[in-house]
Image: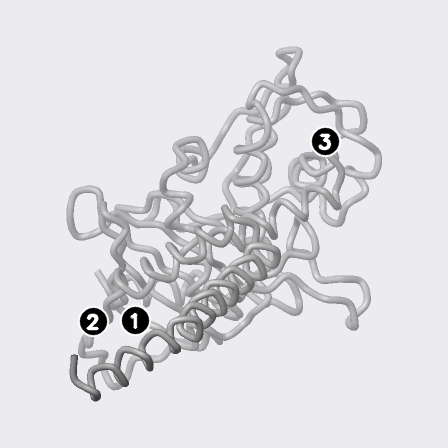
Amino acid sequence: MSRNFKIFLVVVLLSLPFWWMMNILEKNLEDFFYSWEMEKNPPSIFISQIAQNYIIKASVSVVESKIPEDFEITAESAISVEIDQAGNERVLFSKEEIKKMPMASITKLMTALIASEFYYPSLKVQISKVAVGQEEEYGRLKVGEILTVENLLHVILIESSNDAAFALGEIIGIEGFLDLMNLKARDMGLENSKFFNLTGLDPENSNQPINYSTVRDLVKLTGYLLKNPLILEILSKKEYELYLENGVFHHTLQNTNELLGEIPGIVGGKTGFTERAGGCLLLIMEGSGPGNYLVNIVLNSSRKFEEMRKLIELTR
């Protein structure tokens, strides 16, 4: 055995403890950061976020369409996206798509989603005095009336009733329901959305937080809702005859979306308006191919229906 080889062998043997300790250190660091991430984000949410980030990066493509030079839309934020059967998105038009904006009653899409996923549709709900005391009188609900969750979903999505939204939240408690809305938003990857109430109403005090989202986040929410048959069916109805749980006719609901039934291909949508949010409108339409959907959204528009028509003409 040569002298140089002996020296090399000694060096290797002496270095083994060092590399062994380095491997332990590396593993401990990996375990620490993994545990820290798991504590900050529960496993289901953490995994979902990774999946969402991958899907978002992989499935969104932007179409560089030739927008006419004279095309104008006054809405502060707007977007038009086509979603195919696999969930891939094709952006046809966007304006301030990641700007955080008040969304008014578009909030009720998340309220309805939570109610549809956590309650049985046949669950009976008695309307409380507090629920009836919410701003506005859409839905015409009265104290003591009993309706099923499914019928309340019709009232909230067709006539945009604040009373119905509050009544759905009271079943498990308003704060708990809000927690579910925000947890769901986080789980779905709605990174720029936050809910502080179930209705989308402006807070009484201007210093209080207001529900906000972005048109990009609302496209994600819509993509999720497309897999919920009950909500999609309700959004498609221009009218609905509402009955109490005891079979007594209440009244005929009239959809607040005036474009429904006017423009061919509209699947459904949700309107909204408050002083701070302005006019808001989310519209789902049939896409360019079977199983495809076109999602158009305008936020803070003084002429939401007119501008939605312009957006449809531009992107269809």
Give the camera-side residue of 258 and 151.
Answer: 151
Q: Is residue 252 above or below residue 102?
A: above
Q: Is residue 65 left or right of residue 220?
A: left
Measured from the top left, where is residue 118 in percent x and y? Answer: 58, 32
* Residue carrying label 2: 63
How far is disc 3 from disc 1 in space, using C-alphas?
A: 40 Å
Q: Which residue is mark 3?
A: 171
Q: Going by the image, does 246 lie left or right of 127?
A: left
Q: Residues within 10 Å of mark 3 (few under 14, many from 20)?
A: some
Residue 44 numbered mark, or none = none
Q: Most extreme residue toward the bottom, as rendered?
A: 4
Q: Is residue 308 above or below residue 221?
A: below
- Reading the image, the residue beneath label 1 is 93
Looking at the rendered structure, the secondary structure element under dot 2 is loop
- Give the Cα separation between the discs numbered 2 and 1: 8 Å
Q: How is the image coloured?
A: one colour
Residue under the image location 53 percent in, 66 percent down: 192
Looking at the rendered structure, the kind of residue marked 3 is Ile
Q: Amino acid at mark 1?
A: Phe
* Quadrant holding the C terminus: bottom left
Apparent side of residue 281 relative to residue 61 in the rendered image (left or right): right
Q: Position of residue 119 (x, y in %)?
A: 59, 28
The N terminus - image quarter: bottom left
Among the two numbered marks 2 and 3 on one chain, the one whose residue lies closer to the N terminus: 2
Crowding at label 1, few (<14), some or many (≥20) Cα neighbours within 10 Å? many
Mark toward the viewer: 2 or 1 = 2
Residue at (31% x, 66% y) in the render: 57
Residues under labels 2 and 3: Cα distance?
44 Å
User: SS for tag 1?
Assistant: strand
